[in-house]
Amino acid sequence: MKAVGIIANLSKPDVRRISAEICSWFLDRGIRVYGQQELACGHGFTLGQPLPEVDLIMVLGGDGTFLTVAGMYGPAEIPLLGVNLGHLGFLTEVEMGDLESALEKLVQGDYQVEKRSMLSARVLRHGETVSQALVLNDVVIGKGPLARIIHLEVSVEGVSIGSYRGDGLIVATPTGSTGYSLSAGGPIVAPNVDLIVITPICPHTLNVRPIVVARDSPVTGDIKTCQQDTFMTLDGQQSFMLDCADRLEITNSEHHTSLVRLSGKNFFEILAKKIMAQNR
């Protein structure tokens, strides 16, 4: 390992101290460090700007921080390792108590890089593209603060699968299946399964259920609701207001996000620790 990047959620308690300790740990072993400018550790860089060549990026924060960084640097396929300073932290697998042993595994090369699928979301308005982005977790069509029903016509591979009325719709990757989709009643999917999960949010009917489709199946949502508080939300981090008659096209992306997985851990072990344990 020759170089690492460090990005952190600056609102987390003690994040600057933790970043400085990680920075010193790497520097003491002759590893170059590129730290987010505000952290004042190693060579500074501006968040969102291209990084010099690094072996991986350490992300300090919660899943929200991880998703933000994945949106910035995921398409470049720089491996990301999350250190959990948040609550659940399903994507940020390293807990603070395990930090030193995790760093040792990194320098020893005792880890694997897991490629996670991403989705491309595009909004068409009168035939023109008005918004386009990549997501690691999910694309959500949702409503504003008023209690109004959203009406969507949803198609897969150009074939209508139904008219959805309710609070909205989630289209998730396997990685995103443990996020908002899970809360809305969607299935938990192992990250190495090639599929897309379509989960309705509070449907106003008894016969609408989540649907699982192949990863390369295009999903289309036509907005039939003419109200000014319908939004598309990307990985819970960005939003875009939708108009009546907008079309949302969601397809598998050629890009991936690379996640560092330390040896001795797998998806089901993390699942048991971070989700199943909450029910005990």
Image: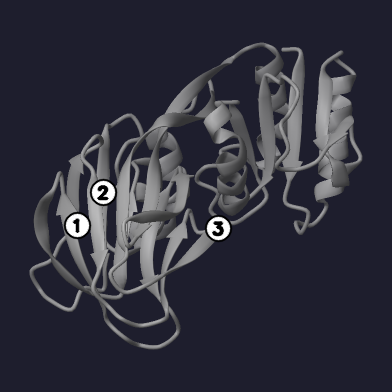
Residue 168 place in picture, x, y as percent: 30, 70
Residue at point 52%, 26% (across, down): 261
N-term mark: 2 or 1? 2
Q: Is residue 46 left or right of residue 69?
A: right
Residue 46 place in picture, x, y as percent: 80, 41
Which element carries disc 2, helix, strand or loop? strand
Q: Mark 1 sits on what residue?
A: 210
**Label 2 vs label 3: CA separation?**
19 Å
Number of labels in the image equals: 3
Label 1: how many Cα within 10 Å (few below 14, some 14–19, many 20+): some
Q: Between 221 and 204, which is closer to the camera in this rendering?
A: 221
Q: Is residue 120 left or right of residue 32?
A: left
Quarter holding the N terminus? top right
Q: Mark 3 sits on what residue?
A: 237
* Amino acid type of the residue tagged 1 in the rendering: Pro
Label 2: how many Cα within 10 Å (few below 14, some 14–19, many 20+): many
Quarter holding the C terminus? bottom left
Residue 51 place in picture, x, y as percent: 73, 29
